[in-house]
Each structure stands twice: as C-alpha cells, then as structure tokens.
Amino acid sequence: MFSWSWGFGSRRRLPGPAARAIRLVVGIGLVVLMGVSLGPAVSAAEGHGTRGYFVAQAESCGRHGCSWSGLFRLPGGQVTRTGVTFDGSYPGMHIGSVVPALDSGDFSNVFPRHGSDSWLFDLAEGVLGICLIGQTIWTWAKRRRAADRTTAGSGYPGAGPSDPGMASSPIPM
C-alpha cells in the first residue's frame, strides 16, 4: 500500500555508531558554518563593510519565505560581486530595485545598511553544533566508562575480588 509518510513516523533508527558519527559530522559542519558566517554578519550589524547598492535580479521563494539574489555595485557604478543574496527585507522590492547595502565579506550575502540580525541565526546554529558535538562525546565517554567497568570485573588475573579463587585465599607475605 502507498504511504505519504516516507518512513518519518517509523521506529527504525540507525545503529548507534552510525547515528553518533552522523551527529558528530553535522555538529562540526554547523560550527564551521557559524565560524564562516558569524564574523561578516556581526560586522554588518555594526555598520562596517563596503558601502554600495544591491540590485535585485531574481526572487526565490521556499517554505521559509522569499529571498532576492542579484549583484552588488559600488556608488560609482562598478559591479564588484554577482550572484549574492540580500540578507534582509525591503518592502516593495522587485526586479531591478536598487537598495543601499553593505558588503562585509560574507561568502554569499550582502546586508542592509541599517543592520541585520541574521548573526543571531548564525550564533544559534553554532550553539546547536556545539551541543551535538558535546552530546556525541558524552555518549562515547559514557560507553567507554561502562566498557571499562565491565572488563574490570571480568575474571582476568588480578581483576580483584570478583575472582572466586582470590576472595577467600589469604594474601601471601
């Protein structure tokens, strides 16, 4: 029978080591993305960067709203970047709109001159990445401690009182 759920509601999960490895890779990716994006976003929020204009060329809409891509040009008219996204909103923007913007060195965005709060999202994704990394390390450490406790009382020579022959025999001097 056909189902629209695509398995999202199923109880099947990845095996523990695979899930932890994926969680670690995603966490590292989020921290790296934050490291690359946070600096330029904070710089733009403080009003630092190259002043120029964003020229809207294409709008793309998805589940989380719409965004505009276009080019960044200096006040003299020289185009310095193409294919950038305007990281902000501007009422009434349409193809060909020219909006005051800042280029603060982000790899894909230019920002409104009045500032942007997109750095908060960058910071949140970094915190999420750090939490994923921490959770993975905590799980590995917990499993390691449990494994160490299991081998400590396993009956190996010199393992301690759990060895039945050693518990009642006196220690020779």
Image (spheres, rainbow, N blue to C red):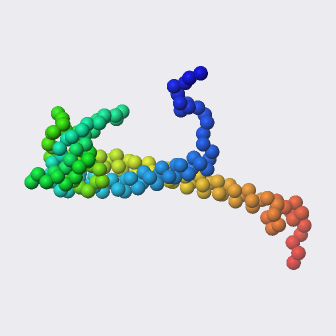
* Rendered image quadrant of residue 104: bottom left
Q: Is residue 165 above or below residue 41?
A: below
Q: Is residue 98 above or below residue 77?
A: above
Residue pushed farthest bottom? 173
Question: Is 121 situated left or right of 91 in this image?
Answer: right
Report the quarter where the N terminus lies.
Answer: top right
Callout count: 0
Residue 39 picture location, percent across and down: 30, 57
Q: Is residue 159 visible?
A: yes
| Residue at the image position 36 percent from the left and 33 percent from the top | 63
Residue pushed farthest top? 1
Residue 171 picture location, percent across and down: 87, 72
| Residue at the image position 19 percent from the left and 54 percent from the top | 80
Report the quarter where the C terminus lies.
Answer: bottom right
Q: Is residue 130 visible?
A: no
Question: Is 158 situated left or right of 81 in this image?
Answer: right
Q: Is residue 93 above or below residue 110?
A: above
Residue 3 picture location, percent across and down: 55, 24
Residue 18 picture location, percent across and down: 59, 48
| Residue at the image position 38 percent from the left and 53 percent from the top | 33
| Residue at the image position 75 percent from the left and 61 percent from the top | 152
Front-most of 65 and 69? 69
